[in-house]
Amino acid sequence: MIWFGVLAILTLTACGQSEPEFAYDSEKPTNPETPQPPTPTPGSLSTKMIFGGTPVREGKMLAIVGLTRPRAWTPSCTGILIQPDMVLSAAHCFCENPTNGDAYVGHDASVEGGRYYKIAKVKLLTSCPFEGGTDLDLAVVKLIGPIKRASPMPFAALTSVDKAKRFRVAGFGAIDLQALKFPAQKREAVIPKVSSACQGSQGDRSDAKAFGCRSGAEIVAGQIGLPDSCAGDSGGPLLVTAAGEPGARSAPDLLLAGVTSRSVVESEHPCGSGGVYVRLTPDARQRVTQAIAALRN
């Protein structure tokens, strides 16, 4: 995972937005470098995967979008639709990469059939470069127009997050320990909760020291040898039902419990050791609301 404070230290605006020459709801990314999506690398669809074992069902979980770099078909990060034209993602996705890409809506960006929505502006809720454990790894992305084919995902109550023992994760990330194989396919998995708010301890070390998380502001989930979010899943959702359950596969009743940020510290591999997720505290939600207001001005 990279997956690796006043509000909005940095605002980024896409180029050429005054008179766009593209449809904001398009079957292709903006100015694609190739006429067709790239073919996945051999072996990238192996059944032995870090990020779960199941692709998201076609037409489901459309609020979970892929965020592409300029002219690219396949996502490099993930995001969550929280308003018809607003996507919540991870700040570190935008610290070094250009922002004038697209939001991909679909289940498999390696084949045709998805839709692309041009990114207009991005508001970061932290400064760059992002240092894990220091501030909110969140960004709000404004699109040129609304995504009409997907319903925004509601936030989960913190009581549901705290009583959950497992979560569901989803995203467009890599599927191997070394984060080298990217099928460009939206996948999901169930992972165990380790710490609701990074305020416990692991032996003689606090959660903050053991995992590199921010006390009171981040969630730790996933364990060695179990499914895990990976590179490319950054900015994607940690999901739970209102009852505090991980829900059924591709279920429509899932709520946003957190946002994928990075792997835990001291991981043996880039993926597969557990991850750190931004906890959507009242402060985080207020800052997201303020960022949306600023993007609309």
Image (cartoon, helix red, strand yellow):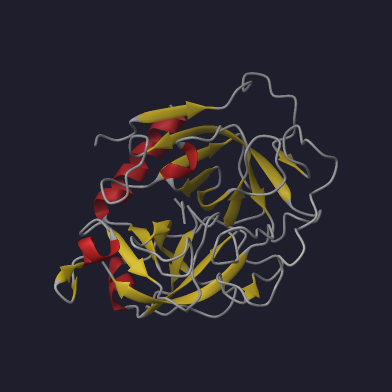
Q: How many marks?
A: 0
Q: Is residue 27 left or right of residue 184?
A: right
Residue at the extreme right: 35
- For the residue pair 263 and 100, the one nearer the viewer reads as 263
Q: Can see residue 163?
A: yes
Measuring from the top left, give residue 145's x and y in whole percent. Answer: 62, 37
Residue at the extreme front: 268
Q: Can see residue 148?
A: no
- For the residue pair 21 and 67, the one nearer the viewer reads as 67
Q: Is residue 290 above or below residue 49?
A: above
Measuring from the top left, give residue 205's x and y in whole percent. Answer: 17, 69
Measuring from the top left, give residue 135's x and y in whole percent. Answer: 28, 45
Q: Is residue 213 left or right of residue 169?
A: left
Q: Is residue 79 left or right of residue 57?
A: left
In percent of the image, x 62 and y 56: which residue is there?
150
Q: Quadrant of residue 194?
A: bottom left
Q: Is residue 109 above or below residue 244?
A: above
Q: Is residue 3 above or below residue 124?
A: below
In percent of the image, x 25 and y 46: which residue is there?
134
Q: Quadrant of residue 73?
A: top right
Measuring from the top left, give residue 271's x and y in whole percent. Answer: 49, 64
In percent of the image, x 46 and y 31: which residue is there?
296
Q: Quadrant of the C terminus?
A: top left
In percent of the image, x 59 and y 66: which residue is there?
176
